[in-house]
Every structure is written in structure tokens, then in C-alpha cells.
């Protein structure tokens, strides 16, 4: 029964995605073959960077002395919030061992990934806080070695607050390197890097595609496309605040969807008008206006349950709830990256460091995965232990199952244990 009060004309450009895929595939093939030489060539071609890639301690210290104390203090607050929450998450990961039958012990352990590479994007909006979300969380998880990469912003290299953030969050090595060549270097161990086991971080479509194609060579956190926001609001919500929060995410890029699902037609129309009014004075109007025009939607639904159904269908990266029944929505909603309950909180809080991680699923991936968290840096591995009597007792079952599947060498491994541990019956 949903009805659209506003919808955007734009859909995913399949041809553009194919061009990105083909370009990245060619770049990765070149990088695998030529390694350091290809990295240097792409860094000069795409970023104009010909300086050494590894950032030295003297450069980091010089940047730290120049940055305002207020920035460093604010960063410390955000880092503490994120890492404290990550520690609480870590505490929830319990290792188990249980005797599931006479002489049969099963268990699992949580083991941190050894080497991780964290990419921090530059571009129009250098996401300084991404260093906390990736490097800082990896450190809490117990990752042994962390590499940080960020593209040069100007002739001095990495954006100064980003460089400080990577160091303060705990990166062991920092490289001034961007894009596909940065991800490939971390995955393959180019330009002096230790080859990593996992790469994390957001980025432009080329970065996202490089992560997709490198998956398997290394692990990844998740695939993230253009950022998304969906707000569920009823007639108790403030249309000005709803409009503000929609535009707060629309400024990310011209392809960033901003969706409103509401049970109130009056509120929906008020928000549409308010967005247009606020756009007039918005410093990032050029981007946000295109995003709202092409990808903004206002969906009218009959009741709260239909609002939940629509939201779960969209499976948004960021989901805000501004209703008279916020607890009901918290209990019932299933598909989202991160949920912001009530008008008192906003996506920007999560983005910058209230504590939850801002690396979140997009493109309906929230149907099957959550975002980056301390558990993403952990491997849950299992083990088995048996007494001779238990081995002899289970061996005939395993032997018959192997025979059913025609896995006769498997069958022999069970049969020899019957002979070794059995009593002859």
C-alpha cells in the first residue's frame, strides 16, 4: 500500500559499473605483474605523488605539533568512545568448550587476524574518523600489525588530521598512497609493506571494486557503496529536524540516497518543502541538491508495521526513527547497518565517534551482514578432542557415512581407529 510523495528518477548505471570493474581488473593485473613499478606509476598518474610512500616519524611528530589542541582533544574523546564500546563487544565474545557426549569435547576459540591494512579515503571529504573505526578497533581486537594508507591531499602528503589520526589510533606503518594501488599494495606486500591478511575501509567506486576483486587474496570488512539514510517518522516528528538529517547524509555525494518513510502525508509534504528551503542556505548545496533530486524519496505508508516492512526492504545503511513508538520500532526492525533511536541522536554522532562503528553495509547488504566491529577482526575457529573410547564409538558412524558418499580413503581413516581403539565388537 506504499505511495510515493517524492521519488528520484535515477537508478544504478550498469554500464558505468562495468567500466569501473574492467578498469580495476586491468589495474590489478598490472600491479600483480609489475608490483612496485606499477604502484609508483599509478601514484604519479592518479595522485601526482612521486615522493617516498612510507611516512616517517619526524613527519608525524611535526604534524602533531601544528594541529590545534582542540582537535586532538576531540579526537581523543571519539577514540575513547569507539574503543570502549569495542572492548565491551570483545567481552561478549565467549570462548566455549563442552563435553557433548562421553569422551567427546568440542570447543571454539576467537583468534585475532594477524596483519590488517586500513584504508582512509581522501577526496572532497577526508574521513578522519575512519582511522578510529578501523585502526582503533583492530587494536582492541588484538591485531598484531596494522598498516594505514591514505592518499595525498596536496604537496605535503596526507591530510594532516588524517595522518595524526592514523598514528594516534595505533597504526604501525603509515603510507601516503591512495586508491586501487593502495589496496593492492597492502594485499600483495608492495613498496616495503608487510602483506596483510585483511583490508578495511571505505572509498570511491574504484576502491570498492578493488576490495571486491581482492577478496580471496585477502579478507575484507565489507563492500560499501554510496552512503544511505532512511528515516521513519510519524506526525510526532519535527519536519525541520527530519529534513536536516536527510540533507546531512545527502551531502556525501550526488548518488547518496536519502529516504523518508512516514505514516503522515502532512509530515511528508512538510519535509519535502523544508528540504527545498534548507537547501538554499546549505554550504554543500551543489552536491546535496543533486542527491535529493535524483535519489531522494518520500514514501507514505498506512501504519507502523508497513513502515517497518518498507524499511526492511530498503535495508538502509543508516536508519533513524523519530516516532511516538520508538521502542516498538527498535524491537521489530531487522535490516539496517546502524539504528539511531529518537530525535536526540543523529547519524553524524555515529559517523564521528559516539562509539558505534561507521563502516556499514550499503546496497541492501544489511539483509545479511552488519557493519565493521571488533568481531570482524577475529576468526572463530573450532577444535575437537576425544578419548580412545569415544573415537572407537563414533568411528563406525563416520565409516558408514563415508562409504555412502564413496569417500573410501575417508572411510579408512575411521576404520583404522576402530582397529586401534575398539574392543573387537
Image: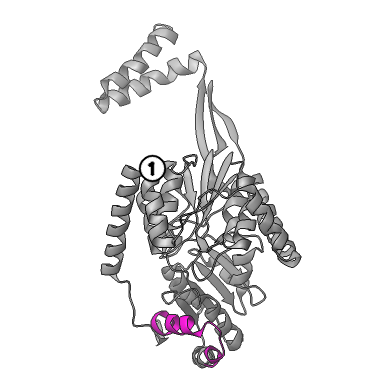
Q: Is residue 143 left or right of residue 261?
A: right
Viewer can see residue 219: no
Q: Position of residue 50 (x, y in %)?
A: 46, 55
Label 1 packing within 10 angstroms: few (<14), some (14-19), many (20+): some
Viewer can see residue 186: yes
The relative height of residue 115 versus residue 178 in the rendered view (above or below) is above
> Could you say which is closer to the camera, residue 138 or residue 73?
73
Count of all numbered marks drawn on residues in the image = 1
Q: Position of residue 43 (x, y in %)?
A: 42, 56
The rendered magenta stretch, by its main secondary structure, is classed as helix
Residue 239 sits in quarter: bottom right
Question: Residue shown at 35%/17% (left/top)?
Answer: 413
**Residue of label 1:** 217
Question: Residue shown at 34%/82% (left/top)?
Answer: 9
Residue 23 sits in quarter: bottom left
Residue 312 counted in the magenta span? no
Quadrant in which the C terminus is drawn: top left
Residue projecting furthest to the top: 424
Q: Position of residue 350 (x, y in %)?
A: 61, 66
The relative height of residue 280 versus residue 419 in the rendered view (above or below) is below
Q: Position of residue 355 (x, y in %)?
A: 65, 60
The relative height of residue 216 versus residue 275 in the rendered view (above or below) is above
Question: Residue shown at 57%/90% (left/top)?
Answer: 281
> Could you say which is closer to the camera, residue 294 or residue 252?
252
| Residue stretch in magenta | 277-300
Question: Which of the colour schemes (rainbow, by chain, secondary structure, one colour) is used?
Answer: one colour
Question: Residue shown at 50%/88% (left/top)?
Answer: 268
Say which element carries label 1.
loop
Q: Is residue 227 left or right of residue 67?
A: left
> Could you say which is closer to the camera, residue 110 or residue 420?
110
Amino acid at each position: 500500500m506504499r505511495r510515493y510523495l517524492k521519488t528520484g528518477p535515477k537508478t544504478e548505471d550498469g554500464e558505468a559499473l562495468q567500466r569501473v570493474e574492467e578498469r580495476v581488473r586491468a589495474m590489478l593485473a598490472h600491479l600483480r605483474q609489475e608490483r612496485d613499478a606499477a604502484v609508483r606509476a599509478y601514484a604519479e598518474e592518479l595522485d601526482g605523488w612521486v615522493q617516498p610512500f612510507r611516512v616517517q616519524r619526524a613527519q608525524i611528530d611535526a604534524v602533531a605539533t601544528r594541529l590545534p589542541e582542540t582537535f586532538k582533544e576531540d579526537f581523543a574523546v571519539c577514540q575513547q568512545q569507539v574503543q570502549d564500546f569495542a572492548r565491551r563487544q570483545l567481552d561478549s565474545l565467549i570462548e566455549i568448550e563442552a563435553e557433548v557426549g562421553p569422551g567427546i569435547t568440542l570447543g571454539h576459540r576467537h583468534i585475532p587476524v594477524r596483519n590488517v591494512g586500513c584504508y582512509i579515503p581522501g577526496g572532497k571529504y577526508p574521513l578522519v574518523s575512519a582511522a578510529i573505526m578501523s585502526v582503533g578497533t583492530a587494536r582492541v581486537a588484538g591485531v598484531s600489525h596494522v598498516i594505514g594508507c591514505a592518499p595525498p591531499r596536496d604537496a605535503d602528503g596526507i591530510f594532516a588530521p588524517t595522518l595524526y589520526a592514523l598514528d594516534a589510533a595505533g597504526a604501525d606503518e603509515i603510507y601516503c598512497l591512495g586508491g586501487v594501488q593502495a589496496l593492492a599494495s597492502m594485499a600483495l606486500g608492495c613498496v616495503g609493506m608487510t602483506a596483510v591478511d585483511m583490508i578495511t575501509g571505505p572509498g570511491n567506486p574504484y576502491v570498492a571494486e578493488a576490495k571486491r576483486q581482492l577478496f580471496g587474496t585477502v579478507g575484507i570488512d565489507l563492500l560499501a557503496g554510496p552512503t544511505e539514510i532512511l528515516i521513519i517518522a510519524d506526525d510526532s516528528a519535527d519536519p525541520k529536524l527530519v529534513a536536516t538529517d536527510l540533507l546531512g547524509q545527502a551531502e556525501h555525494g550526488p548518488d547518496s540516497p536519502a529516504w523518508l518513510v512516514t505514516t503522515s502525508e502532512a509530515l511528508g509534504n512538510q519535509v519535502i518543502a523544508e528540504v527545498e528551503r534548507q537547501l538554499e542556505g546549505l554550504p554543500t548545496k551543489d552536491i546535496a541538491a543533486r542527491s535529493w533530486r535524483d535519489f531522494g524519496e518520500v514514501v507514505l505508508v498506512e501504519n507502523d508495521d508497513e513502515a517497518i516492512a518498507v524499511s526492511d526492504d530498503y535495508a538502509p545503511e543508516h536508519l533513524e526513527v523519530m516516532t511516538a513508538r520508538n521502542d516498538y520500532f527498535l524491537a521489530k526492525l531487522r535490516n539496517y547497518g546502524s539504528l539511531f533511536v529518537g530525535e536526540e541522536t543523529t547519524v553524524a554522532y555515529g559517523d564521528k565517534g559516539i562509539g558505534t562503528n561507521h563502516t556499514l553495509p550499503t546496497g541492501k547488504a544489511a539483509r545479511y551482514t552488519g557493519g565493521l566491529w571488533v568481531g570482524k577482526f577475529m576468526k572463530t575457529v573450532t577444535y575437537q578432542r576425544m578419548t580412545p573410547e569415544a573415537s572407537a564409538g563414533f568411528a563406525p558412524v563416520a565409516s558408514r557415512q563415508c562409504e555412502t558418499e564413496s569417500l573410501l580413503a575417508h572411510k579408512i581413516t575411521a576404520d583404522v581407529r576402530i582397529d586401534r581403539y575398539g574392543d573387537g565388537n
